[in-house]
Amino acid sequence: MNHVVIGTLAFDSIETPFDRRERAVGGSATYFAHAASKFGPVGLVGVVGKDFPRAALADFEARGIDTAGVEHADGESFFWSCRYEADWNTRHTLETRLNVFAEFDPKIPDEYKGAEFVFLANAQPRIQMRALEQMTKPRLVVADTMNLWIENDLDDLRALLGRVDGLVLNDEEARMLSGEANLVRAAGRIVALGPKFVVLKKGEHGAFLLGENLRFALPAYPVEHVVDPTGAGDSFAGGFMGYLAHTGSLDPSSIRAAMLYGTVAASYCVEGFSIEELARHRRSSIDRRFDELRSFVTP
Amino acid sequence: MNHVVIGTLAFDSIETPFDRRERAVGGSATYFAHAASKFGPVGLVGVVGKDFPRAALADFEARGIDTAGVEHADGESFFWSCRYEADWNTRHTLETRLNVFAEFDPKIPDEYKGAEFVFLANAQPRIQMRALEQMTKPRLVVADTMNLWIENDLDDLRALLGRVDGLVLNDEEARMLSGEANLVRAAGRIVALGPKFVVLKKGEHGAFLLGENLRFALPAYPVEHVVDPTGAGDSFAGGFMGYLAHTGSLDPSSIRAAMLYGTVAASYCVEGFSIEELARHRRSSIDRRFDELRSFVTP
């Protein structure tokens, strides 16, 4: 297994201005793995409770997502609920119950330890570091993070940043982590903290990559009917990493293409609740939308 | 004169979190003409009061901006003052005094009437229409508008939309005009009202063009030090139209290049107060930044 993600498997209850879903399968690692699996096998490290449906995990397996790294714990699975405003940019978290994730101590299966491509989905930086320390020859390590850890676990996060190649985060988090309102300067400051590159996710406004030798900005794919934005960032990361793991190349043109694939994965994600739309589309649809996006942004 | 802009010449008093300027030269037509003049001559139609400095107009002339269309009226020039918040996206208009612009009735000089490229800067749609009616063979007519006219002069605005080729407006105005929150659908609805294309200006998030046969999205140029965002949209329009008037081509590749030139003009505009930075840069700097932007966005 050359590509591994460590993160959450969860139940999400989502309320949008138009519809709602109760206890749909979600979680950062779920979204990531579904996007990444379009490009090749991916190993999933996380924890579920007794309530997580075995059929869902079997379906993951059928899609090329290896679930040998999913721990089955006593208790209930991670649960999260939220409500979106009509502009989609305003999200109210209604409830977060860590449940079995509260005691999560990632154990990387032996057959995953040699993976070259590693994604540390959003979690406490200490947990992300525990996972990373078990990897024996990572070549591209990318982490996600969030405002909670920037506020409460900054020392752990800084230690992690010294060990990762890339960091993905949203624009507000970048401003918070860097203390810079200007996003270009914010990204520059974050790169100075350790990562070789940072990807700023700006939702409907696209994504911006700033690295040592590469700057690349990309608008979002113009989705006409957003159903549920949950998981878009993790799907982006899954498409980005999945493509790179598949090609094995980290040159600038591959990284640019990976940004497009990430954007395409995110666009399918938001067109349905949970992983409904993301799971439905095969690599051939992904490639069609990739071509469309490329023509949409090529000067 | 093959390229003409109709709009305001004004004094602007601007307060930012970092600095301020009192009664600097501004106005939609001023910004537009400075950007457009990098590519070739442009004729300026507007009105100034007794207080507008003759030296400023002489400086316009020295830059290839023809001021034969500037009417000199008794009274004071258009005055506008505003204050920006630190995020730049929040702008508080402190005062608007139309002064001589209140009675403005555009009179197009004979030598401008045959211009093929016409920009109707933000003004009451009725005034924009009065100007347009005097043009004898326009080939590309683009208009700007704002929330005030969408709210108060919608019938006049709709009549105008039936007569223009393109409309530029910001994302909030597009949502207001179309009644659609989703920007892709909003742009589609506006195109259905008459224009062949619409350009949505999204400030630091770039611009998006939706036309009958063309969709093109472009991030903003990554400006590291924003000094004053005033005039960015008009500078964008000036670079866009100036390039098209210069090449004389309206094919998709020219329109894409024009979007980049508009973005570059806007980036110089926001790096200084008033037209300070925009005026300082020659076509050679514009072309250097154009190449940089192209490499920044090319997949």
Image (spheres, coloured by chain):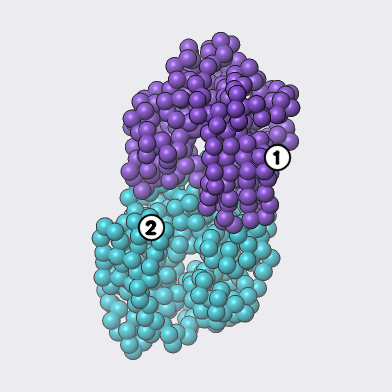
Chain colours: A purple, B cyan
Instruction: Name which residue lies at 40% across and 53% down.
Output: B267
Q: Which residue is mark 2?
A: B88
**Between A65 and B9, the one nearer to me in the picture:** A65
Q: In the rendering, at what x and y percent does residue B209 appear?
A: 58, 56
Nearer to us: label 2 or label 1: 1
Q: Is residue A144 above or below residue B196?
A: above
Q: Residues within 10 Å of mark 1 (few under 14, many from 20)?
A: some
**Type of the residue with mark 1:** Glu
Check the image and report above or below for A281 versus B207. Answer: above
Which of the labelled discs sits on residue A181, or is there none?
Answer: none
Query: Looking at the picture, how far across and down is residue B166, in whole percent?
Result: 59, 65
Amino acid type, label 2: Trp
Q: Position of residue A289 (x, y in %)?
A: 67, 40
Q: Position of residue B152 (x, y in %)?
A: 55, 79
Q: Residues within 10 Å of mark 2 (few under 14, many from 20)?
A: some
Residue at 57 percent across and 13 percent down: it is: A109
Q: Which residue lies under the disc numbered 1?
A: A277
Numbered circles on residues, count? 2
Q: Secondary structure at mark 1?
A: helix
Does residue A238 appear anywhere in the picture? no
